[in-house]
Image (cartoon, grey):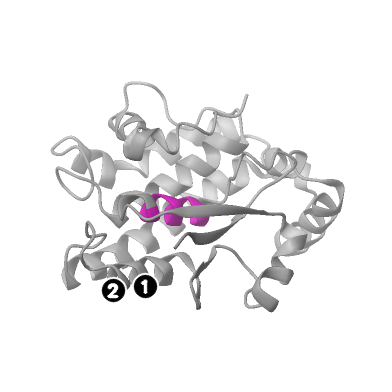
Amino acid sequence: MTILLYDLVGTDITRPFSPHCWKVAMALAHKGLDFKRVPTPFTGIAKIEGGVSKTVPVIRDGEKVVVDSFAIAEYLEDAYPDRPPLFDGAGGRALSRFVESWSQSAVHPYVGIAALVDIHDRLEPADQEYFRTTREARIGKALEEVPVGREGKRDAFLKSLDPIRLTLKRQPFLGGQAPLFADYIVFGAFQWARTISPFEFLPAGDPVHDWFERCLDLHDGLARKTPACT
């Protein structure tokens, strides 16, 4: 049975960009499960499965509907134990929670700020209005003011990646010799940047950049098939 993945899109429905949806897409591919992406704009999220969630990702697997990327990964691990593991045990599950917290505190804030206007510009008009209204209320300033100076802040951002950079100098993936869900958590943030903004977040030659390229090629190039934003 094909699993449905409700996936965030803008004007180009072939370019899903949510970091959390990308985590799930990679997890589904990792498990070797058939899935279909359901393109969903910001203003369409409230209509998903009778309003089950205010955010994506959401999946439907037969009669089961699951919300939240980490909860979905846990569901896939438990529902399909005979497939390749996403956590490789309880310890890996707990460590993935740490990686999620680190990624959302170290990677997401800079990407979200640097790409904010790029995201807005790639949405349909109704979604642009929603996005601007909600983000400006949250941030307290005009969208256009937020990315100002992003180039000057990139070095500090790159320095913040040292924990994974040092790890990736010793092994090809955060999961070791092969990827685990921890890899997809961090990958999702950079795939978000790659698919929605032409800004260069990772310079070539950086171990994090090399790891990201390896992730793009995973699962028959699933992520690379969505072209980089230009």
Q: Nearer the viewer, residue 71 or 78?
A: 78
The foreground one among 169 and 15 is: 15
The residue at 37%/58% (across/down) is: 102
What type of secondary structure mainly makes up the magenta span? helix
Q: What element carries label 2?
A: helix
Q: Helix, strand, or loop for circle 1?
A: helix
Picture quarter containing residue 101?
Answer: bottom left
Q: Where is residue 42 in the image (x, y as percent from the top left)?
A: 72, 58
Q: Mark 2 points at which residue?
A: 78
Residue 6 against residue 79 in the figure, above or below: above
Q: Residue drawn 50% across and 57% down?
A: 20
Q: Does the magenta stretch include residue 225?
A: no
The image position of residue 168, as x and y in percent, is 21, 39
Q: What stretch is highlighted in magenta?
A: 20-28
Residue 75: assigned label = 1
Q: Could you say which quadrant of the image residue 156 lies in? A: top left
